Amino acid sequence: MAASLLTIMIAARLLSQEELGAYFLIMVVVQFVALLGDIGLRNTAIKSLSLLPVESAEFIQMSRYLLTMTLTTSAIACLVVGLAIPLLVSLWPYQDFQQHAAFVLPIAFLTTGLQIVMSLLVGAKQFVRLSALSAGIEILRATLSTGGILTGLGLSSLLWGMIISRIVGIGVIWGRMPTLFAPTFRHSRSTELLKFGGWLYGGSLISVIMVRASDLMLTTYMGTAALAVYTAAMQIPAILQRIFESIRPAVLGYVSAQPSADGAQQVEIVRITTAMLSVCAIVLILLSEPLITVLYSEKYASGVSTMQALSVWIAFAIINYLYSTILIGNGESRKAFLLTIPQLFMIVICTGLLVPRYEGLGAAMALIATGFLGNLVGAWMLGGDDQHTRYTLLMVTIRAAVPLLLLLISVFYTQDSFLLLTSCCAIATALLLATNTIRFSDLRAIGPVISRMIGQIRANRAAA
């Protein structure tokens, strides 16, 4: 994460906002294309392979099948989007995007490939190797990208850095686990795997649309410079999302190993996570202005309000990811998909109304409304027929959301006074304590939860 942030910091200073915005736009398109080629098999691999002995014939056969299918569908997706590149260029006729639009296809294909082979590492319980490889890939990408920028290669260096680092990452895994790379289109459970992955695919596609619809509409209405400011404002809050994504495979594997997990335990996990995210959101709101100016320079200062709003959104968004992860781990991929449906309608309505009027801040406000709705729906779904669990989860969401939203409204009127901003953050924290959202006992409760997860992982590795 540090390497990635350093790359954006240097790019924000040495590239124009139009160039950096074009890079962010390319990455949005890459994310869509990569997702089209995934068809939900990345999470299916984690869910299914985690339950199998690593050296078993079933593990090897399933890994080969999932890898072959993912790479095949990814190649098809890249071919289809490649035919549509002229349409994209005409939709966003910005010079820097036009010159580099061809990079979308190789980056998308390599991104999908890297994600699926890393899922195989998760399924094999190779967490240490996964961690080292992930860090190595990011450091290599940052080194190549920043080196290229400093030598005057401009936007192209960011894209080539991504391509080369992904090739190296896939090559390393290939060298370590060559038996998993033999192609095969046959598997005895292919229908079951594709059905399970299909629900995940639908949910993932809608999730990306929800998050990136604002980016695309903002670019269409305001241009790549506005997208650069908005995406720069999102970089720091998105670190929280990347932290969750880094531990998500372990969380999913833990939940998958306990399909009949106690409802009270799940409520406690959601409540503690909500409390921690609420505190993080308050801290980010307080520090938004110095972080923006120090990291990206004064020319991105207009994104301070947007970053403050995105700090509240990311808390809601990660709770949605947590709900989805628990549902997938419990084998309820259909519910994980249905969780995204009302959010899709909300983001479409809100972006259409708010982005043309408030630009980047409007995009952030649309995400907040969508994320909060997702929290309510997720609490309802996870509670199931247990009315007490459902009510408890709903109250956890509301007790955390009200102080954060009140704080966000108040900070828009205290931007010129750090003392008033600090006072508002202190009041919001006090409200979280008063409503029992934050408990000092949470620090003691986190330890046993982590210990159980580590114990489960070790047990799985020992069994493998």
Image (cartoon, rainbow, N blue to C red):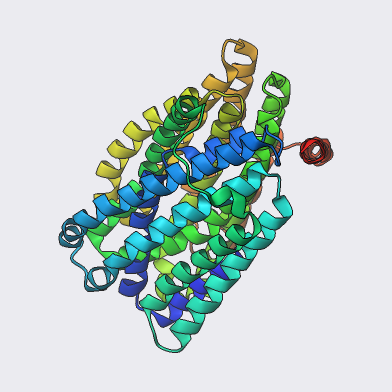
- Left/right placement of residue 202 relative to residue 132 reads left
Is residue 131 among what the camera can see?
Answer: yes
- Residue most toward the bottom? 151
- Provide residue 315's location: percent of width, then percent of height: 56, 43
Q: Nearer the viewer, residue 371 or 290?
A: 371
Image quadrant in which you'd find residue 21: bottom left
- Provide residue 262's location: percent of width, then percent of height: 72, 20
Is 331 situated above or below 37?
above
- Provide residue 377's location: percent of width, then percent of height: 48, 25
- Left/right placement of residue 151 relative to residue 422 reads left
Residue at position x 62%, y 43% in the image: 248
- Left/right placement of residue 364 relative to residue 221 reads right
Residue at position x 47%, y 51% in the image: 310
Image quadrant in which you'd find residue 273: top right
Question: In the rendered image, which quarter contains the N terminus?
Answer: bottom right
Is 157 situated above or below 1?
below
Residue at position x 58%, y 66% in the image: 137
- Provide residue 82's location: percent of width, then percent of height: 25, 57
Is residue 412 among what the camera can see?
Answer: no
Q: Nearer the viewer, residue 45 or 283?
A: 45
- Left/right placement of residue 411 relative to residue 390 reads left
Residue at position x 46%, y 45% in the image: 68
Is 390 situated above or below 30?
above
